[in-house]
Amino acid sequence: MKNHEPTAESASSLSQNNRAHFRCQYDLGCYQAPSLNSIRNRLIRVDPIELDKAFMRWNKAYAEDDQSLAIDGKVRCNGFDASGHQTQIMSAEGHHTGIGYTQKK
């Protein structure tokens, strides 16, 4: 799926220092970038409510410099809910800092 390729490409483009920081597997004298399947398998196990709470705590701590928000919406290709409607995602980003405040379906 093309939507997932940038994630796998981003992981493979990380430097050895960055891979060490993210605790990538160390094998044959260097840190190995995770495969697309490894990334996807980890992400599907994340509790979305807990992840949203963590983002909100982070934003509360670090995103106090914004006085306005930029709101953006997207419709996911091939993303359909149980009733057959396409998934729509809205996000709010700080206008001055570019920090993402939230993203909701």
Image (cartoon, rainbow, N blue to C red):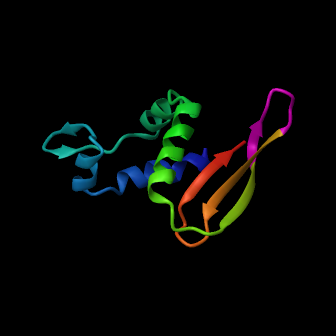
Q: Report the front residue among 63 and 20.
A: 63
Instruction: Where is residue 16? Give x, y as percent.
Output: 23, 54
Which residue is at a point 51% across and 45% down the rendered structure image? Answer: 55
Instruction: Where is residue 91? Give x, y as percent.
Output: 67, 54
Residue 65, image x, y percentages:
51, 68
Magenta part of the chain = 76-85
Residue at the (25%, 48%) spot, across then down: 21
What residue is rendered at 22% in x and 55% in y?
17
Residue 25 as seen in the image, left or right of residue 12? left
Q: Quadrant of residue 26?
A: top left
Tell me: 31 left or right of 78. left
Q: Is residue 26 left or right of residue 8?
A: left
* 66 or 74: nearer the viewer: 66
- Residue at 27 percent of width and 43 percent of height: 32
Quadrant for the N terminus, please: top right
Q: Quadrant of the C terminus?
A: top right
Residue 15 part of the magenta segment: no
Furthest toward the left, the residue is 29
Q: Residue furthest bottom?
A: 96
